[in-house]
Image: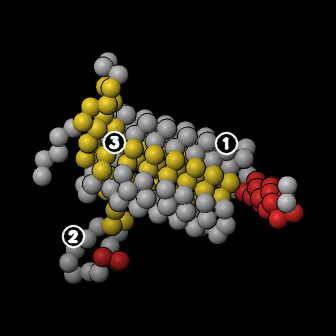
Amino acid sequence: MSMSRFVARLFSKTSRVWFSFKYSSIFRMLGQGAFLNRPFRIDGADRIELGSRTVFQSGSWLYCSGGDDLSPSLRIGEGCVFGYNNHIAAVREVQIGDQVLTANNVYISDNVHSYEDVSRPIMHQPVLFKRAVVIGDGCWIGENACIIGARVGNNCVVGANAVVTSDIPNYSVAVGVPAVVIKQYDPQLQVWVSKSRSL
């Protein structure tokens, strides 16, 4: 092993030990080996659960805050790998299963900005809870995808740049804006079945 690789591994291990030592008492639950690469931002860590061996690349932002009238929860399972610059926001409930993989710049949120009052700038209007987000085990979320107030089943693929605002069943491939299912696995036939897309 070269000296540079040895130093890199030593730095990585030291960073993980530092992260666990500093944040284990701050998170609601921090599993063994869970880690966020710096820089990162965390709001509401006492309401966030990270499963064992879940890793975020740098630039990630975990937000879990809903004000006095809400009790938000952000739960992420074991063995997940999140790409660079992922943003996950919960004002009430976001739940992500085990071994979920995301690309870069993925946005997951259970809330939206209200805009109905045309007499006020949107930035001064409240954030509203839309619907709990649940992402099943084993999913792959593509680059720049957004999942807002929707449920995604187990072992689903969400294509790059997709905007998911309605539920996706288990074993599906969904693409587009808004995202639609273009392929789904049939457990009885044990084959993937293409779905027609209405234009």
Q: Are there few (<14), some (14-19), or many (20+) residues within 10 Å of tag 2? A: few
**SS type, badge 3:** strand
- Going from N to C along the chain, the mark reached first, 2 or 3, is 2
Q: What kind of residue is marked 1?
A: Ser
Asked if disc 3 and disc 1 are in contact, CB closer than 8 Å, the reply is no
- Going from N to C along the chain, the mark reached first, 3 or 1, is 1
Q: Is residue 78 visible?
A: yes
Asked if disc 2 and disc 3 are in contact, CB closer than 8 Å, the reply is no
Q: Nearer the viewer, mark 2 or mark 3?
A: 3
Q: Which residue is mark 3?
A: 173
Vertical relation: 166 (above or below) 105? above
What residue is rendered at 54% in x and 58% in y?
A: 83
Return the residue found at the far top: 188
Q: Are there few (<14), some (14-19), or many (20+) residues within 10 Å of tag 1? A: some
Q: Which residue is mark 1?
A: 52
Q: Is residue 132 visible?
A: no
What residue is rendered at 20% in x and 78% in y?
A: 118
User: Residue 198 location, x and y as percent?
Assistant: 13, 47
**SS type, badge 2:** loop
What residue is rendered at 61% in x and 65% in y?
A: 58
Q: What kind of residue is marked 2?
A: Glu
Q: What kind of residue is marked 3?
A: Val
User: Residue 199 location, x and y as percent?
Assistant: 12, 52
Q: Which residue is mark 2?
A: 116
